[in-house]
Image (cartoon, rainbow, N blue to C red):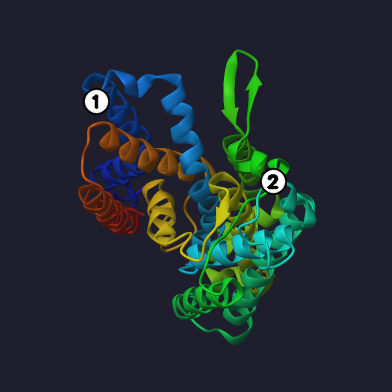
Amino acid sequence: MTASQLPDPGTSQPRDWLYVASRLAAPLFLVALIIVFSILEPNFLNPFNLLNTLRQVSFTGLIAIGMTFVILTGGIDLSVGSLLALSGMVGAYVAKGGLADRFAVGRAVDAGNPWQLALLAALFIGLLGGAAQGFTVSRFKVPPFVVTLGGLTVFRGLTLILSEGGPISGFEKDYNFWGQGRIDIGFIENVPIPALIFIAAAIVAAIVLRYTRFGQHVYATGGNRQAATLNGIPTGRIIFSVYVIVGFMCGLAGFLLSARLGSAEAVAGNGFELAVIAAVVIGGTSLFGGVGSIFGTVVGVLLIGVLQNGLVLLNVSSFVQQVVIGLVLIAAVAFDQFATRGRRQGS
C-alpha cells in the first residue's frame, strides 16, 4: 500500500466526533435540562407535571412525526398549523351537525353526530390537504416551500370561511374524552390519552422507517434523489406519500386538540410550524434530507416541551420563551450544517 492510500487519521477522527455529537447532542441536552429544572424547581419532577408536559407536547409531536418523513426526503411543510386548524374545525362542524348549535351544551349536543364520524371527517380533510400538496410538489415540481406556504394561507382561510370566524364548542363527553381523558397503565396512573396516541404513533413510524422498504426509499430519496430514481425507486410516489402522512397526522392532531380544549378555533395551531420543524431538526433530522430518525424527533419534541414547562414553572415570560426556542432552533440548524460539511469533507 502506497503512502497515498493510507488513511489519514486527522480526517477520520473529526468525522467520528461529528457523527457522535450529532447523534447524542439532543438526548444529552434533554437530560441536562431535566437535571437543571429539577434542582431549580422541585415540583418539576412531580408525576402530574411530567404527564401534563407529555400531553402538552403530544399534539405537536404527532405532526412532528409526519414532518420527519417530509424532511427526510428533503422537503418541508409550512402549512401544518393551518391544516390542523381546518381539520379540527371540520371535525367539530360534523360533531355539532353545523353552526346552528355551535355553542350548545347539555342535551342539545346530542343533536349532532357521533365522535367517530367527526374523527373520520378530520382525518379525511388532513389526508386531502396533504395529498393536494404532495401531488403539486411531486407532479409539477413546485418547490415545497412555495406550495406549503400557499397552503398555510389557503387552509387558514378555509377554516375562517367554514367557522364564519368564530369557535365551535360544547361537545359530548365521548368526544372530549380523546383530548381530556386519562387511564391507568400498570403502576402509572392518569396517563393522558393524547400522550398514549403520540407514543403509539412514534413506535409505528419508527418501525416503518427502520424495517420497511418504504422507509428505506424515504431515506434514499432524501439522500440522493437522482441516484434513487436511477435505481428504480419511485421518488415521485415517495414524496407524494410523505405529504399524505403529515396530512394524516395534522387531521389526527386537529381532532385531539379540539377535544382537549373542548372547542375548535380558527386560530388553533398558530406557530405550530416553528415548534414542529424545531423539534425535528433539534432531534437530528437534517434539513438536507436523508439523515434522521423518529427517536430523535421524539427527543426533540420532549426537549422543547421540557424547556417550555421548566421556564413556565420558573415564571419566565412567554416572550422570553419564544426567544429561547428560536435561538435553540438556530443553533441546531447551524450545527446540522457544520456537521454535514464536516462529514462530506471527511468522507
As measured in the structure, the alpha-carbon distance from the residue carrying label 2 to the one carrying label 1 is: 46 Å
Residue 270 place in picture, x, y as percent: 42, 62
The label number, if any, that marks residue 301 in the structure image: none
Question: As rendered, which of 74 and 192 lies closer to the eye?
Answer: 192
CB-based contact (under 8 Å), mark 2 and mark 1: no
Specify the amino acid type for callout 1.
Val
Packing grade of label 1 (10 A; few <14, some 14-19, many >=20) is: few
Task: Report the side of 113 relative to 301 (left or right).
Answer: right
Above-or-below relation of 148 to 315: below
User: Tag 1, which secondary structure?
Assistant: helix
Specify the amino acid type for callout 2.
Gly
Image quarter hosting the C terminus: bottom left
Above-or-below relation of 230 to 318: below
Question: As rendered, which of 297 and 229 lies closer to the eye?
Answer: 297
Residue drawn at x 74%, y 47% as measured from the top left:
107
Q: Can you see residue 113?
A: no
User: Tag 2, which secondary structure?
Assistant: helix
User: So how many labels did they put on this image?
Assistant: 2
Mark 2 or 1, closer to the camera = 2
**Location of mark 1 (residue):** 36
In the image as oriented, which residue stretches furthest toward the bottom? 140
**Location of mark 2 (residue):** 106
Question: As rendered, which of 100 and 97 lies closer to the eye?
Answer: 100
Residue 11 place in picture, x, y as percent: 27, 48
Q: Can you see residue 271?
A: yes
Packing grade of label 2 (10 A; few <14, some 14-19, many >=20) is: few
